[in-house]
Amino acid sequence: MTDTIDLLRQSGIQPTPQRIAVAEFILGSKTHPSADEVFVMVRQTCPTVSRATVYNTLNLLVEKGLIRQQVLREGTIIFDSHVAAHHHFVDEETGEIHDVPWDAVQVSGAEKLIGFEVHEFQVVMRGRLRAK
């Protein structure tokens, strides 16, 4: 918890018990939860947290660059604690989202896009996981 409090303070975020609970959950998450999923999970350890506090805290963490916000599931914003460059694979059968290492996918042609100045890109693949 001390690490989370220090991280929040270093990012200019006043650590409250509710913000700490949200930050600890999302920063420790290996999944890509929606705000509602974060609310349900955080509520188990911090019953005083409100839905508005969860949404506001998630947006603040995005603003400070501690997490990323993306639309990878149809109509649902998800939050990703893995902020380094990477791609995603969405399992169409389960809806699970998996991180794909940046170097595993090559993209070419951005320089041929006339009239566009590309600052960032991400590949989102959809399909089904094969049995290992």
Image (tube, rainbow, N blue to C red):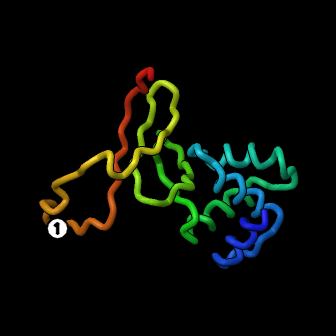
Q: Residue at x 55, y 48 (%)?
A: 78
Tell me if residue 117 comes above or below residue 122 in the rendering.
below
In front here: 47 or 11? 11
Residue 17 at x, y = what percent? 83, 63
Tell me if residue 48 comes above or below residue 4 in the rendering.
above
Residue 79 at x, y = what percent? 56, 52
Which quadrant: the N terminus?
A: bottom right
Which quadrant: the C terminus?
A: top left
Horizontal side of 103 relative to 66 (left or right) equals left
Horizontal side of 31 relative to 24 (left or right) equals left
Q: Residue at x 41, y 26 (%)?
A: 128
Tell me if residue 7 comes above or below residue 51 in the rendering.
below
Horizontal side of 55 relative to 44 (left or right) equals left
Q: Which residue is mark 1?
A: 115
Q: Secondary structure at mark 1?
A: loop
In front here: 39 or 127? 127
Residue furthest right in the image = 48
Residue 63 at x, y = what percent? 56, 69
Q: Residue at x 32, y 51 (%)?
A: 103
In front here: 48 or 120? 120
Query: Total marks drawn?
Result: 1
Residue furthest front in the image = 132
- Snapshot quadrant of residue 59: bottom right
Q: Residue at x 75, y 69 (%)?
A: 5
Number of other residues with Cα within 10 Å of mark 1, as a class: few under 14, some 14 to 19, many 20 or more: few
Tell me if residue 118 comes above or below residue 69 in the rendering.
below
Residue 12 at x, y = what percent? 67, 79
Q: Amino acid at mark 1?
A: Gly
